[in-house]
Amino acid sequence: DTAVSQTPKYLVTQMGNDKSIKCEQNLGHDTMYWYKQDSKKFLKIMFSYNNKELIINETVPNRFSPKSPDKAHLNLHINSLELGDSAVYFCASSQEVRDEQFFGPGTRLTVL
Amino acid sequence: GDSVTQMEGPVTLSEEAFLTINCTYTATGYPSLFWYVQYPGEGLQLLLKATKADDKGSNKGFEATYRKETTSFHLEKGSVQVSDSAVYFCALSAANSGNTPLVFGKGTRLSVIA
């Protein structure tokens, strides 16, 4: 069974569109994260939720909105997509904020 | 704030060569330290970790020792294989982190050629 799963794996869309990425973890963890990885492999944390509560909200455009319907799911909705949003987005989870994190396989977003 | 500095890549080695990827950190107290590996097209996986000074983490032939005196956690492997080609990330978890998650280095790309 996959511990942290994301859908879709690939997402190709036009500028200005709205899209969502879904994440689910079956590890029973309390904390989930979204990261953005650029073409140079630099990882930037975007958001973190602990027990459905937003605890980390880095400097991210407000076009990005996370939603956590329950502690096993953390979705990412992106409005008005821009070329610079093209990247790989990773979901991760951990039991506590300072614990080791388990990563999903990533969603490669390409904005044309 | 807390930070992790890794040697810049890419690192290119021949098969069976010795590998060292340097990692140093800045943090207060005694953080936990991690190495993650990202194979092409995949997410990050925990490779090894150490939670206190002088601990040695090891996995799949890789080792790293938590050195408090030099604030380092260098990754080593005695004989690399082509299958070790990946991006390696050093990370720390601050001792009194509150809501601060892991701090990742910028990653070091390793290419092993046959």
Image (spheres, coloured by chain):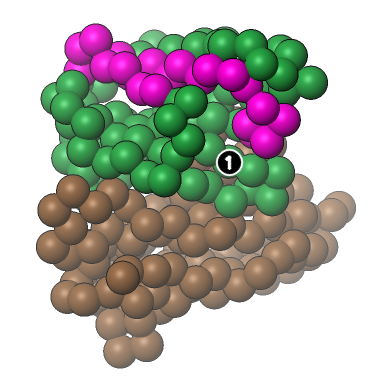
Give the left or right position of residue A43, taking residue A68 as reference: right
From this view, report whether residue A41 is shown above or below residue B34: above
Q: Which residues are magenta?
A: A65-87
Q: Nearer the viewer, residue A110 or B107?
A: A110
Q: Residue at x 51, y 19 (%)?
A: A78
Residue A76 place in picture, x, y as percent: 43, 19
Residue type (three-letter) at the residue carrying disc 1: Gln
Q: Nearer the viewer, residue A27 or A8?
A: A8
State whether residue B7 is above or below residue A53: below
What chain does badge 1 belong to? A
* Image point (59%, 19%), residue name: A80
What residue is at 27 percent from the left and 58 percent from the top? B93
In x, y percent, where is residue A64? 45, 26
Residue placed under numbered mark 1 in the picture: A37
What is the letter of the green chain?
A
Chain drawn in brown: B
Let me know if residue B73 appears in the view.
no
Residue occupying image coordinates x 84% and y 54%: B113
